[in-house]
Image (cartoon, helix red, strand yellow):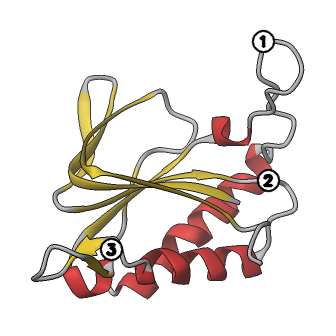
Amino acid sequence: MKVVIQRVTRASVTIEQQLFSSISKGMLVLVGIQADDTDEDINWLASKIVNLRIFDDENGVMNKSILESGGEILAVSQFTLMARTKKGNRPSYIDAAPPAISIPLYEKFVATLSQELHKEVQTGQFGANMQVELLNDGPVTIIIDSKNKL
């Protein structure tokens, strides 16, 4: 499982010109799922995300987690994070889990993240053509791969 985390002052998802979800200060989390991802990947990532200290404390130092800052999370599925680009110029998405695997894992990830955050996580719509808008704060962008824990 790979995630791209962006600290934002606001973020939203629009589908077919209709606002689907939005958050104010917090994190936009783009989520890529592989076929071999497990509950262990979900639990590790959810804990890592909510405890990641990327929000400013009273001294302007990134020393607070989203739990401590009271921010929100918008989690959006994005199979293109699993792209292979080593050969040629057209990305291969062979590492991305098919919907039968990735939908339940994505839903479980969102539920686990909500539980860890102690509030509902906003989402996009799996498989939809979404327009994701954000105002990156910092900018702060972090990439985490659950296969590279050590």
Quarter of the image where the C terminus is located: bottom right
- Residue that appears at 43% across and 77% down: 52
Vertical relation: 78 (above or below) 138? above
- x, y percent for residue 107: 57, 64
Few, some or many residues within 10 Å of mark 1 (<14, 14–19, 20+): few
Few, some or many residues within 10 Å of mark 2 (<14, 14–19, 20+): many
Element marked by disc 1: loop
- Residue that appears at 42% across and 47% down: 124
Residue 26, picture quadrant: bottom left
* In front: label 1 or label 3: 1
- Residue that appears at 79% across and 73% down: 38
**Residue reaching furthest left?**
58
Count of labels shown?
Answer: 3
Element marked by disc 3: loop
The numbered dot on residue 29 is: none
Q: Is residue 123 toward the left or the right of residue 127 in the image?
A: left
| Mark with earlier residue (1, 3) | 1
The residue carrying mark 3 is 120
- x, y percent for residue 71: 22, 72
Tag 2: residue type? Gln
- Residue that appears at 26% across and 72% down: 55
| Mark with earlier residue (2, 1) | 2
Nearest to the observer: residue 17 or residue 29: 29
- x, y percent for residue 70: 20, 80
Quarter of the image where the N terminus is located: bottom right
Vertical relation: 85 (above or below) 41? above
The numbered dot on residue 89 is: 1
Tag 3: residue type? Glu
Q: Is residue 34 toward the left or the right of residue 145 in the image?
A: right
Tag 1: residue type? Asn
The residue carrying mark 2 is 34
Nearest to the observer: residue 66 or residue 14: 66
